[in-house]
Image (cartoon, rainbow, N blue to C red):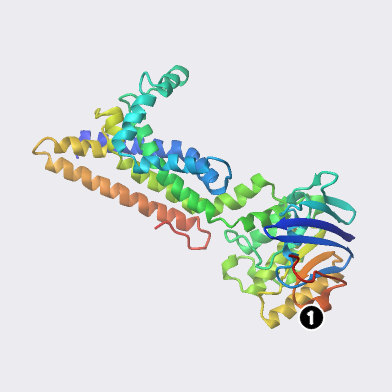
Amino acid sequence: MTPEEWEIILLSLKVSGVAVLATMPVAFGLAWLLARGRFPGKLLLDALVHLPLVLPPVVTGWLLLILFGTNGPAGRWLAEWLGLSFMFRWTGAALAAAIMALPLMVRAMRLSIEAVDPRLEGAARTLGASPWRTFISITLPLAMPGLLAGAVLGFARSIGEFGATITFVSNIPGETRTIPIAIYGALQIPGNEAEVTRLAIIAVVLSLGALLVSEILARRSGHGRGSHVL
Amino acid sequence: MSFEIAVERQLGDVRIAADFAGNGGLTALFGPSGSGKSSILNMVAGLLKPDQGRIVVGGETLFDSAAGINLPPEKRRAGYVFQDGRLFPHKRVRDNLLYGWRLADPARRWMTLDEAVDFLGIGSLLARWPRTLSGGEAQRVAIGRALLSGPRFLLMDEPLSSLDAARRQEIMRVIERIRDELALPILYVSHDHGEVERLASTIIDMGMPAA
């Protein structure tokens, strides 16, 4: 493994890790709204959340470019107020990965919230628990395996993100050259089979490892119920 | 300690209505399934809001549509024993028992874990997960959980219906002791005539489902 390849792997882990951590609260909020909320426009919100799943990734990348580019409405605002810039930076790769991972995370989390029996929450209320206490002590722990599954799916999806990333932030070594983008780049030049193979193996190991770790975590947090992700 | 309950609620095509009073002891709501007995318990517990009416238990108004009073469930101090036990699957028996006890104002607790365990004979179950309990064991834990939350009264929704004959006798004796030794008022729902005859001091006949 060359130092350059290590850089690619560490960058991929950083981009995906930040993408998932930053998306968790947003995905959970959306999953909660879709699972428990009753409001006009719920169907539209559901469709919007799922849009990155069905849209060509290149279109998602282009939309990100328009919105979060230097002159984009969101991009200008974030640069002015938070000093955050996305263009050709790893933060842009994380944003693209987050948007692409969002539908998978919301889906898994929504299912796990819907699987919590509201009658258990009612029982907690009669025993003296406030709505917030009920959420913390009953709903959240019971939904936890699904929430973890959502996070891990999102992480695996982020590791594999390619189309929106390359459209939005291109292929910059050390900033946006993640594993899939490096593999694609290496394939453009003959004679790079060894590098491609090494990176491809890393991609498989990371994805498989993420799934196994989540399975173990979910079984531990299953509290003797034998919950699982896989 | 008395129940004074007059409530109405439309649920889909069914109108659930009740107007009755019970004076201490065990007040049984007796009637066929579909007559809205469980919905009335849910209204008393605060889990279902009546369209209109008034719920007073032991002089305290829990709900009064005219006066705009609607206490949330956690303020009603009702010990609710559900038909299916409804134990928290992610907590061991001990933590199920202590769930309401820990939340209760210490001044309002009137039973300790040891007392509840002795009263119900569940000492050997404390470290078990709910899914490993038999129906009778789960129901005794559910009763213990309700008693430990420091309730002013109990609500029991067909607590015997999922049990075999021997377990039914056992839990019925427990309910009699709650009624007589602990002198806790109980609002009890059942469709079984023998059960109601044996346990109730007041029987409210809910009759046929109201169309």
Whether residue A39 can be seen here? yes
In the rendered image, the residue lying farthest to the bottom is: B166
Q: Front-most of B43 and A134?
A: B43
Q: Front-most of B5 and B197?
A: B5
The picture places residue A104, in percent across and down from the top left corner, at 40, 46
> Quadrant location of residue B78?
bottom right
Q: Residues within 10 Å of mark 1 (few under 14, many from 20)?
A: few
Secondary structure of the residue carrying numbered label 1? helix
Quadrant showing the N terminus of chain A:
top left
The picture places residue A103, in percent across and down from the top left corner, at 41, 43
Up the image or down, B165 lies above or below A130; here it is below
Quadrant showing the C terminus of chain A:
bottom left
Q: Residue at x 47, y 19 (%)?
A: A81
Whether residue B113 can be seen here? no
In the shown orientation, is residue A30 left or right of residue B3?
Answer: left
Q: Residue at x 46, y 58 (%)?
A: A219
Please, what is the three-letter code of the amino acid marked with disc 1?
Answer: Gly
In the shown orientation, is residue A31 left or right of residue A203?
Answer: right
In the shown orientation, is residue B205 left or right of residue A187?
Answer: right
